[in-house]
Image (cartoon, rainbow, N blue to C red):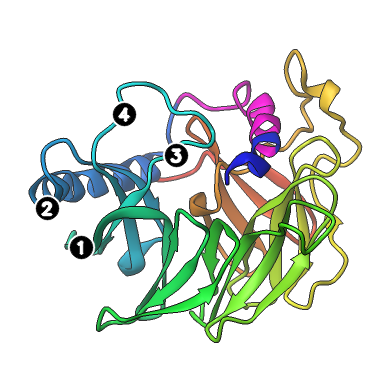
Amino acid sequence: MRKPFLTLTLLTLAGTSALASERLNPADLRRVTKARESLVPAVAKEFGPKARFIHLFGQGRGMLAGIVAEIPADPLGTDELPLLAIVRYDESTGAVRVVDREFKYREARTLGSEVALLDGEGTLRLRDANGKDRLLARSVGGDLFPSAKGDALVATLLMNNEGPHETAVGIIDLQGRVKVLADGPGVDATPSISPDGKTVVFVSGRTSVASFYVTDVEGAPARQLTNVGLENYMLFGGPPKEFVPPPVSSHHMEWMDADVLRYNAGGGAFWKINVRTGHAAPDVGGEP
């Protein structure tokens, strides 16, 4: 199921390593350290000493963590990503609570008081506070990112035989209605929706260089924001100075306001991009 994303992954890695900072933003370092202090002992207690948390989904009170039963001894291939159990982590208090003990999920995000759970088969379900699940959508590739109101989420869709391309970017509401917002050549993935619920940015490899594009919740024609005019061969030997790296995933994005998106570009490098103008620059701020 991960094969459609391989091309975009390779394009991403081609440009990020040379730009990655060796120093993590101090504010982010404190955040990760705080999460580890709470999650490591809780995971060992609930899942055993070999279990590890390997993903954080979301921010604040709605943060979730993905747990593996143990770290594989050998490196995994692209199609062999381990499935996860899910716990809820409250960033403000450090409290940890198990959402699901089964190792069968690829991603999870909170939607208001509920939790969206994506399993290894691409089936997306919504779990309420009483532990009851209901089906939201099938053929979901991942990259879940909820709206600020908790009434919908954007995601990468696996088109199968329903479109000319392997993946698309779509929005899914709480009634399970799915609307395709962007379906261009190459791979469209890693969407994020602005706090006002109007703008959707995503990453596409349609020009051979992984770049940010912008559309809206009505599916307006996508506009390229970054790396305009660049081609893949221009990145070999080190990317040009105007190259803007893509995010490592939708789970490493946060909106500063309705126009500015902050994201992890890999290797400890954080960037900010204005989704109206396309202006992007490294974020090296944070308290000392």
Above or below, 116 relative to 261? below
Above or below, 259 relative to 239? below
The residue stretch that appears in magenta: 8-22
- Helix, strand, or loop for circle 3? loop
Residue 283 is situated, as x and y percent measured from the top left of the image, at: 56, 42
Residue hosting label 2: 46
Mark 4 neighbour density, 10 Å: few (under 14) some (14–19) many (20 or more)? few
Residue hosting label 4: 72
The label nearer to you, 1 versus 3, is 3
Mark 3 and mark 2 lie on one chain; the one further toward the N terminus is 2
Residue 154 is situated, as x and y percent measured from the top left of the image, at: 61, 67
Residue hosting label 1: 98
Q: Disc 1 to disc 3, how far (Cα)?
A: 21 Å
Q: Disc 1 to disc 2, how far (Cα)?
A: 8 Å
Q: Disc 1 to disc 4, how far (Cα)?
A: 22 Å
Residue drawn at point x = 35 percent, y = 54 percent: 104
Mark 1 and mark 2 lie on one chain; the one further toward the N terminus is 2
**Is 50 on the left-hand or right-hand side of 9?**
left
Amino acid type, residue under disc 3 in the picture: Leu
